[in-house]
């Protein structure tokens, strides 16, 4: 009966709030500039203090985005500068970046201010979840739990077993992928007073924003942002979506184009290559008994996610002369292999036969048949890696990335072909073609990767420069040695990282990542 009366009373409160006349822009009596001056005077806030609202994440108060409720309540948007998300169930995360607000309440002639952070656990019309309130006058913090707009005691939350997803002590959230406490109850001169309307927040605050059921006058220049429930796919969700779909992250490229790279993507090493890696293990660590001290980084792993498909061709109409003899195409591709560092800009990468702990691949790499030779790559920057010649014939060879003890894992997993084809007009096209995926993929790495790829410093930019230098140097070598060659158009296909980021941010459904070319 008590719960019914509480709920009935609560509904009356909400209905009474909704029936209050809302001011039009012409009727506004709240001067935001006056409020801003008053706020700064009372709280000591400086606009360049990004840790003022919450020391656990960076933010700035957006005075251009505000809502008035009557003449005595004001909400001002807090723009969260870090990525802020929280786990509200075992597999559901939501973004909180739009859910932090300054609330001002006028008592008599005095304004009082608090920070409200809304953490809704569902999309229902009635509020379910947490509301964090922090007084900006005494620093006291209050964490309240709600089920269908009704405040639920913390003890009942524990009894109901909801503490893991809705903590009853300190609230923790992921700030740029790292777990941090963002609020703990108490502090200040008191522990919060639920009867003081100037301090704790409740569902009425959440519903005061349009279109949540209430709404007041929008501030001039305001963007209309309101607290939201934005579900973010978990690592498990993402992996399930891309399982056995190596091209899942390249949804905007037709399958007929992707098929050009399918042979390279799906190539797997044979038993001789596996045996070679086992023999290297035995040399480096006798008695290892297939401990997989070395192994192939297979792009066809169940969760492989192709993030790069490239093709860098050179058209050769007349082959070059070397040592007084015009080379055949077979001889020229062999010459390129044995002198590969002369055909690339080694500022980006340098290829050397693998020499480590009793293993020396120099003779095999420089032989007429380099099948299963291991080559170490000194890559510009902190990440080096090694590859093995997994396929070889007179028209070219394939490098496959491997894990080995000198460098550890290669930063990408996949295959790269070097070779040539004869064209119908009698000319030749020499090329390198690669299909790679990121070696590591977990929740934090995935997020950081998408942000990294969206910027200017993404890792394949360096690879592009390396293979562009390969094109230019091969063509120049041919032209300087009695031949004729020209650089052909590159083909580079990569994920639309803005789309991937939209999926991770909960702006687009997981179904967006669904390409399954075979």
Image (cartoon, grey):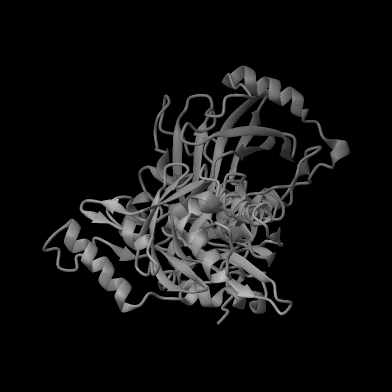
Q: Quadrant of residue 365?
A: bottom left
Task: Tell me the residue at 61%/75% (across/down).
Answer: 260
Which residue is farthest front?
324
Which residue is farthest left?
287
Camera sees residue 500: yes
* Quarter containing the C terminus: bottom right
Which residue is farthest right?
26
Camera-nearest residue between 175 and 185: 175
Camera sees residue 119: no
Image coords of residue 424 (percent x, y) = 71, 80
Camera-nearest residue between 92 and 452: 452
* Quarter containing the N terminus: bottom left
Camera-nearest residue between 6 and 105: 105
Q: Quadrant of residue 221?
A: top right
Residue 419 in the image: above or below residue 478: below
Camera-nearest residue between 418 and 142: 418
Residue 313 in the image: above or below residue 349: below
Image coords of residue 444 (percent x, y) = 44, 52
Count the labels in the image: 0
Drawn side of residue 360 relative to residue 214, left or right: left
Residue 499 in the image: above or below residue 209: below
Image coords of residue 397 (percent x, y) = 47, 69
Drawn side of residue 509 relative to residue 299, left or right: right
Image coords of residue 262 (percent x, y) = 55, 76
């Amino acid at each position: 009966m008590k719960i019914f009366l509480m709920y009935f009373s609560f509904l009356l409160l909400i209905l009474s709030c909704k029936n209050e006349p809302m001011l039009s822009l012409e009727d506004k009596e709240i001067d935001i500039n006056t409020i801003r001056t008053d706020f700064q005077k009372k709280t000591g806030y400086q606009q360049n203090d990004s840790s003022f609202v919450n020391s656990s994440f960076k933010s700035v108060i957006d005075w251009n985005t505000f809502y008035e409720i009557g003449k005595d309540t004001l909400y001002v948007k807090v723009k969260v500068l870090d990525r802020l998300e929280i786990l509200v169930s075992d597999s559901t995360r939501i973004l909180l970046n739009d859910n932090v607000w300054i609330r001002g309440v006028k008592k008599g002639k005095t304004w009082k201010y608090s920070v409200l952070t809304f953490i809704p656990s569902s999309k229902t019309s009635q509020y379910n979840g947490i509301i964090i309130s922090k007084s900006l006058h005494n620093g006291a913090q209050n964490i309240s739990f709600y089920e269908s707009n009704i405040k639920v005691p913390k003890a009942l939350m524990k009894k109901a077993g909801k503490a893991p997803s809705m903590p009853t002590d300190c609230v923790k959230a992921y700030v740029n992928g790292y777990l941090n406490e963002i609020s703990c109850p108490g502090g200040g001169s008191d522990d919060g007073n639920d009867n003081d309307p100037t301090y704790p927040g409740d569902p009425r605050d959440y519903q005061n924003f349009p279109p949540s059921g209430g709404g007041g006058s929008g501030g001039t220049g305001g963007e209309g942002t309101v607290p939201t429930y934005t579900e973010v796919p978990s690592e498990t969700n993402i992996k399930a979506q891309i399982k056995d779909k190596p091209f899942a992250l390249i949804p905007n490229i037709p399958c007929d184009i992707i098929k050009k790279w399918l042979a390279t993507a799906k190539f797997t090493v044979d038993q001789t290559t596996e045996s070679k890696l086992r023999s290297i293990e035995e040399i480096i660590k006798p008695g290892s008994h297939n401990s997989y001290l070395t192994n192939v980084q297979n792009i066809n792993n169940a969760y492989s996610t192709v993030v790069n498909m490239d093709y860098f061709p050179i058209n050769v109409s007349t082959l070059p002369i070397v040592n007084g003899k015009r080379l055949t195409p077979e001889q020229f591709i062999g010459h390129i292999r044995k002198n590969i560092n002369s055909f690339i800009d080694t500022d980006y990468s340098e290829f050397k036969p693998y020499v480590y702990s009793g293993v020396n691949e120099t003779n095999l790499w420089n032989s007429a048949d380099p099948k299963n030779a291991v080559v170490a790559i000194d890559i510009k920057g902190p990440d080096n890696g090694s590859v093995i010649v997994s396929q070889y014939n007179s028209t070219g060879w394939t490098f496959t990335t491997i894990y080995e003890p000198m460098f550890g894992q290669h930063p990408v997993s996949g295959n790269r072909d070097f070779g040539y084809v004869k064209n119908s007009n009698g000319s030749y096209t020499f090329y390198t073609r690669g299909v790679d995926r990121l070696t590591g993929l977990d929740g934090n790495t995935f997020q950081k990767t998408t942000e990294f790829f969206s910027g200017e410093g993404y890792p394949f930019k360096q690879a592009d420069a390396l293979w562009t230098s390969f094109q230019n140097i091969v063509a120049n070598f041919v032209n300087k040695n009695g031949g004729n060659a020209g650089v052909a158009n590159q083909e580079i296909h990569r994920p639309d990282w803005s789309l991937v980021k939209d999926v991770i941010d909960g702006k687009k459904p997981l179904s967006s990542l669904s390409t399954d070319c075979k």
